[in-house]
Each structure stands twice: as structure tokens, then as C-alpha cells.
Amino acid sequence: MNLVEILKDVPIGTKLYSPIFGGVEFFAIDHTMEYPIRVHVCSSKNHTDWYVFTNTGAYSYFENAECLLFPSEKNRDWSTFKVSKPDLPELTPCICFDYTRDGAPYIPGLRYYAEHGRCYCSGKTNGHASCWEYIIPIKKYDFENRTFDNEDNYGRAKEEEEI
């Protein structure tokens, strides 16, 4: 079983489960790393830690251990896992914004999508990419009313429910 293949199109923020950490959020697949699956764990209200897993779901340095990353607490069967919505194609034009950035209200900007809940910085089409609370494809953004359907958000906007 190759979890990198299973998770390759999963949007950032997808809720998963690990018996080590409890609820986790999928963050990224990094093909350049020995432990390519990266997840975030909310350890307190204001602090998030990240951890890595192997392509078989073993926890980082314990490569020969059993899988410790699952679709949910009750579902330990990856063959039943369904991606809730496919990731956007890379370079999709998007509106990106946070409610605040560096303590100040942030103005929406046009960016190109870089996959897995990130957009390229400064309007570029490669290089460094950043996470945003809201990443809305331009086709789905109502410019006249400055609104969008939350289902069209590919960013990291926090849900009310804690994981």
C-alpha cells in the first residue's frame, strides 16, 4: 500500500487519524523527502505541530513499524478512503486572502495555485508557495458581492469543530 499515491490529490486540511496523535490534518506530500507525508496536529489553541510519515504510513524514523496513519479513528481501511474533493490543477488563477496577516487586515490578491492548499507568491508561476486561509478559484468568486461558496475554498480556513 502506497499512501503517497492515495493522498496525492487530497486537499490540505483533510482530517485523518493517527493512534499516536489522535486527529490530524493532511498538509502535504513532499516527494523530495525520505518521509513524504506531512500532517499537522493542533496541540493547543495557538500552536500547531507537524509530523511526517513514510509512504506506508509508518511514523517517521520507524520505517519498519506498522501503519499509524488512517482515514479516521473508526476507519482503518485505506481501500475505502474517498477524497472529498479533488485538488485544483496547478496554475489555476485564484483569489487568496487571510483575515489578517502579520496582525493587519489582509487584502485579497490574485495568485496561481501551486497544489495542496498553497499558492505561488507574488503572482509568480513557480518557486515559493504559501498557505492561505482562503484560496478561491477566480471562476468561483463573485467579484460584485465579494462572496464565494465555502465548498470552493482550497485554503486552510479553520472549521468551528476542533480535531
Image (cartoon, rainbow, N blue to C red):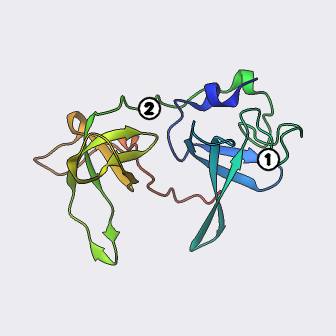
Q: Position of residue 57 (x, y in %)?
A: 76, 37
Is 143 or 130 nearer to us in this picture? 130
Is 81 or 10 nearer to us in this picture? 10
Tell me how far mark 2 sits from mark 1, CA to CA. Answer: 25 Å
What residue lies at 71% left-to-right and 33% top-to-bottom?
55
Residue located beneath label 2 in the image:
87
Quadrant position of residue 36: top right
What residue lies at 13% left-to-right and 46% top-to-bottom?
143
User: Is residue 132 left or right of 63 when viewed as pictured?
Assistant: left
Identified by mark 2, the residue type is Asp
Q: Position of residue 20 (x, y in %)?
A: 82, 54
Which is nearer the N-term, disc 2 or disc 1? 1
Q: Quadrant of the N terminus?
A: top right
Q: Which mark is residue 16?
A: none
Residue located beneath label 1 in the image:
59
User: Is residue 10 left or right of 39 when viewed as pictured?
Assistant: left
Quadrant position of residue 108: bottom left
Q: Secondary structure at mark 2?
A: loop
Q: Position of residue 95 (x, y in %)?
A: 24, 47
